[in-house]
Amino acid sequence: MLYSLVTSLCEMAYASGLNRFMGTYGKNSVIFLMYHGIIKSRPHDSLKNHYGYNIEEKEFESQVQYLASHCNVIKASDALSGSNLSRNKKNVVITFDDGYRNNYTSAYSILTKYDLPALYSISTDFVADRIPLWNDVIEYAVMNTTKNTLKIKYDDSEYDFMLGTKDNKIKLYNWLLSNCIEIKQEMREGFVSDILKGLDVPVNNEKLLRDQDYEPMKPDDIRIMADSGMAEFASHSVHHYTLTNTTIETLLNEATESKNRIEELSGQQCKYFCIPGGHYNQQVTNAVFKAGYEKIFTSEVTEFDLMKKPDIIGRYCITGSVNMALFADMIQGPIHRLYYFIKSMG
Ligand SMILES: [Zn+2]
């Protein structure tokens, strides 16, 4: 209800040009945007991309055009060191999570057209070893099963799911995602493999990864991007685990091994860590800093204030439901600023 009011007010602010007027303040503030996949077209009537984390290429290009015309888009390293900031335009850093190949084939080529830099955070098991992301495996299996029912034994209980319709499949998909986030890491692999057996969908990694929405970047892509000087790389861990459900040893390994591999792949120092799924606590941040990272990026909506020198930095997630009016207002205000201010007051 409140958000639909926000949407209407954003449409009015965008139509009147209020955003651009409001955006011309705050030399010390920087907005970090978080994208995931950039896809050719939105699948119709499918479970795929149900939450809209992947956005269409043409929508992305419109957003990039807006940023190129009205904002000062800078590298993450410049924003964090206070370099190349604008006094007159909103400072923006573009980031991508996961390491999908469409970040290179679509996003990077569009950004190159407008001469804009970005930060790409990658899960090294996905990119270097071509092991599909666990959430993509679940999406693929639920989408492609021909079973009509599924019985799952979990946590001393038995669950029955109907699978005949898209709505039924979405119910199962949501249940699986939330349990995969909750479950202790060492239990998850067995849990997912039992589900795959039950759904009777053989997951052949190479077949799944040939789908352009699931395919990881190639090492050569990373080198080309890094050599252009317009791409920086961050770690998104090794396995994209929910880091709050792992041991300290696993945490340290996730942070250290991914850092080393990204440095080998990109030839750049890997100084930033983007939290997979946005789940973190003090144990996670301690391990990440211990592994030698300078800054951590999360999925909390906050504006980065250089004067406060934070080590943990929030980002605005851009999904398929963000139209141009919402996009412009997220970056420049005033409606989203007011909305988050009211929310923070409880
Ligand atoms: Zn991710």
Image (cartoon, rainbow, N blue to C red):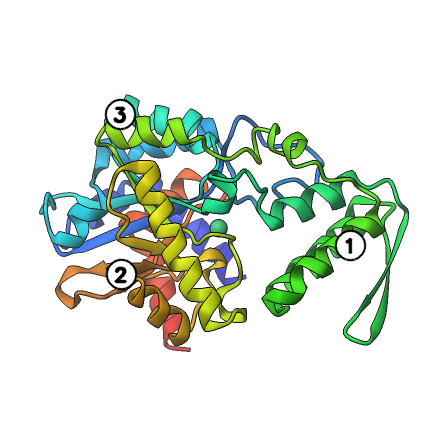
Q: Is residue 256 left or right of residue 56?
A: left
Secondary structure beneath dot 1 equals helix
Q: Earlier in the sequence, mark 3 or mark 2?
A: 3
At a point 45% along the width and 69% down the height, the residue shown is 249
Proximity of marks 3 and 2: CB atoms separated by less than 8 Å: no
Q: Which residue is mark 3?
A: 114
Badge 3: residue crowd in 10 Å (few <14, some 14–19, many ≥20): some
Instruction: Please give left or right for residue 142 compared with residue 49 in the image.
Output: right
Residue 182 is drawn in which quadrant? bottom right
The part of the image, by quadrant, that contains residue 206 is top right
CB of mark 3 near ligand 1 (< 8 Å): no
Residue type, mark 2 in image: Gly
Relative depth, front residue between 149 and 19 = 149
Three-letter amino acid code at the position of disc 3: Tyr
Q: Nearer the viewer, mark 3 or mark 2?
A: 2
The front one of 79 and 323 is 79
Residue 66 placed where, x, y %?
30, 33
Tell me what residue is drawn at x 45 percent, y 50 percent.
8
Say whether disc 1 or disc 3 marks the residue closer to the N-terminus: 3
Which residue bears the numbered disc 2? Answer: 292
Query: Where in the figure is residue 104, as x and y percent of width and height?
Result: 40, 29
Q: CA distance from mark 3 to mark 2?
A: 33 Å
Closest to the observer, 88 or 153: 153
Could you tell me which residue is drawn at 57 percent across and 46 percent down?
Answer: 133
Q: Which residue is found at the position 25% from the left and 35% from the top?
A: 117
In the rendered structure, are the residues bearing label 1 and label 2 in contact, judged by CB atoms less than 8 Å apart?
no
Q: Tell whether circle 2 marks a residue whose Cβ is less than 8 angstroms from ligand 1.
A: no
Left or right of residue 276: residue 170: right
Residue beneath disc 1: 195
SS category of the residue bearing label 3: loop
**Which numbered disc, 1 or 3, marks the residue closer to the eye?**
1
